[in-house]
Amino acid sequence: MNSNFKRHLITAALPYANGAVHIGHLAGVYIPADIYARYLRMRGEDVRFICGSDEHGVPITIKAKQNNCTPQEIVDKYHLIIKDSFERLGISFDIYSRTSSAIHHKTASEFFKKLYSEGKFIERESEQYYDEQANQFLADRYICGTCPKCMAEGAYGDQCEKCGSTLSPTELINPKSTLSGNVPIMKSTSHWYLPLDQYEPWLKEWILEGHKEWKVNVYGQCKSWLDGGLQPRAVSRDLDWGVPVPVDGADGKVLYVWFDAPIGYISNTIELMPNDWERWWKSEDTKLVHFIGKDNIVFHCIVFPAMLKAYGDGYILPENVPANEFLNLEGNKISTSRNWAVWLHEYLDEFPGKEDVLRYVLCANAPETKDNDFTWKDFQTRNNSELVGIFGNFVNRAVVLTHKYFEGETPAALNCLAIDDEVLSQIPILKKSIEDNLENYKFREALREAMNLARLGNKYLTDTEPWKVVKTDPERVATILNISLQICANLAIAFEPILPHTTKKLRYILNMKTSRWEEFGNISILHPGHKLNEATLLFEKIEDGEIEFQIAKLQATKNSNEATAVIDQKSPLMPLKPECTYEQFSEMDIRTATVLEAERVPKTDKLLKLTIDTGLDIRTIVSGIAEYYSVEEMVGKQICILANLAPRKIKGIESKGMILMAKEENGKMKIVSPEQRLENGSAIS
């Protein structure tokens, strides 16, 4: 460990309180952060682990409108669900607070006012979408339309959930307000901006030169943003939910959630240690580490540091930001809006006593360097084969045999053989590897090495076969079981940061009072004569039926999403046109006609040139139906045309008339033809 730091301040991304926590959040942020915090505490380091609910922003207000309640009711509900879920899983926050608290509002307001009074912001007027019916400026999530990248309907003004592209509201095709469904107008509004471009040279030096040790994905994303040039970023927005902008003339404006939320790390620390918080945020002796997902890299590596730099007053900057990639579920991107997720509170209810199984699987499958996938079959296999078959099996055999042959007392190791020395020599090597991986935020590798210690013990028991040797050499069995129990004691330490519920049970079985990291590697933790408690199973097998139930739940969700998608894909019926009089309608001369010849119009994809017999004349019509009808299909087909439409040239061809078409719900166009073949030129009225 770096001895230059006297204390460690660990933050985990503030989860949005508009829904529960799912496995993607856990694998990306909270489990690695908790492992790191627990490890440091075991080493005797001074640690504060800070988090809380992010309770402002547009998704909160949208959820409130959907549920016909207030934003406060939404955040109150989900804050409790999230906090309770974290506690049950064993996430060891020193504080889990919230950004709707009075202390956070005060801290965020004072932060803004200092920057404002020192002229650190610039004020700009800009054109933004406005809903005239709702009488409200539209934040990005209040605007939806067609994604310009993948053409999917229902994309938001900040992101398309189908293709994942980051968008701006003005990029959307056919934008509409989600409040009224109306087409919004552009209207002028004024906001304050943090001029990130002014901090670009400093950020380049601090990150690109000073933190080359950061993870490749973090460093690369920062470099991409910095190379592309930073732009001023708004710190306020027109909304009625959030921290009010604390200056005169800012009615109806709140702090933008990206500005407000990271200040939550500071306000939550103040709430935890009101008289000592500055020592944790303004001392070079403190090591600050942010645990986040990759979608928050820019905010924690560029925006928040620029805010702290602008504020001054000795605020420290993060030493590291070990962001993970995304975890997928059964091959598909996790989506809260589509309910495609494994929710933590539901898991805890449906798998009681198996908190550590989820911690183990998500750590073993952590998306540290690339997106990874969670499957229920892999979850079952890892539990049954690794936790039950290796870890649990080894501990159970060692303890049961000690009770059977030595009345539950740790026997003395007498004469060690080469196989014993070889096994014992591996423990400090594994310890060193686990430490190196934990300190470099490689939690998946640390877990693998910890599991190798259990594999080592399991293989040792299998190779030495004490149940056979006891018949001829009981002293040899004493040595074998002593070494096996020392491995068990080391497992209780090695897995403490990762599987806290399991190691608590293991310490009880071994009658160990504490598990200090400094004892890891000791081959005489349990002294001869140390009394063990009765053996109990650390893990239980997960049966096929339990997994089939979970897969069926996901399949039901998938079926529901597909059914919804089919409905959503249906084109809405065209609204009625303005009322017309009978006289106006009677001026339209609609006749039957037959297509004599058809050919594609060169250099076009949709146009066909049709030669038709109207019964009155032979004429040409150009029609955009090539994507629905082939040339061969059109020849000989009887159609209905608007015969007295004024001629116009299309691609240099004079077109006289228009074919009557009907648009189906799926968007496909079909020609309107007489039910029975009629004489060409028959009038339709």
Image (cartoon, rainbow, N blue to C red):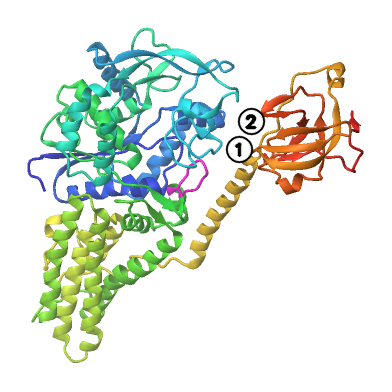
The label on residue 651 is: 2
Q: Residue at x 37, y 32 (%)?
A: 54
| 95 vs 428: above or below | above
Q: Main secondary structure of the magenta part?
A: loop
Locate residue 66: give its quadrant. Answer: top right
The residue that label 1 is drawn on is: 604
Q: Residue at x 12, y 75 (%)?
A: 422
Proximity of marks 1 and 2: CB atoms separated by less than 8 Å = yes
- Residue numbers of the magenta segment: 333-344
Q: Secondary structure at mark 1?
A: loop
Q: For the residue carrying disc 1, how many other residues have a C-alpha within 10 Å: few (<14), some (14-19), or many (20+)?
A: few
**Labels 1 and 2: the sequence-earlier one:** 1
Magenta-colored stretch includes residue 337: yes
Question: Which one is nearer the viewer's eye here, 161 or 407?
Answer: 161
The percent coordinates of residue 239 (x first, y second) are 45, 20
Q: Residue at x 31, y 72 (%)?
A: 393
Q: Is residue 72 visible?
A: no
The label on residue 203 is: none
In the rendered structure, the answer to whether residue 314 lies left or right of residue 685 reads left
Tell me how far mark 1 sits from mark 2, CA to CA. 9 Å
Q: Residue furthest top?
A: 248
Question: Which one is nearer the viewer's eye here, 682 or 408?
Answer: 682
Locate residue 430: give its quadrant. Answer: bottom left
The percent coordinates of residue 337 (x first, y second) are 51, 40
Question: Which one is nearer the viewer's eye here, 214 or 335?
Answer: 214
Kind of residue sitting beneath label 2:
Lys
| 259 vs 21: above or below | above
Q: For the residue carrying disc 2, how many other residues have a C-alpha within 10 Å: few (<14), some (14-19), or many (20+)?
A: few
Kind of residue sitting beneath label 1:
Thr
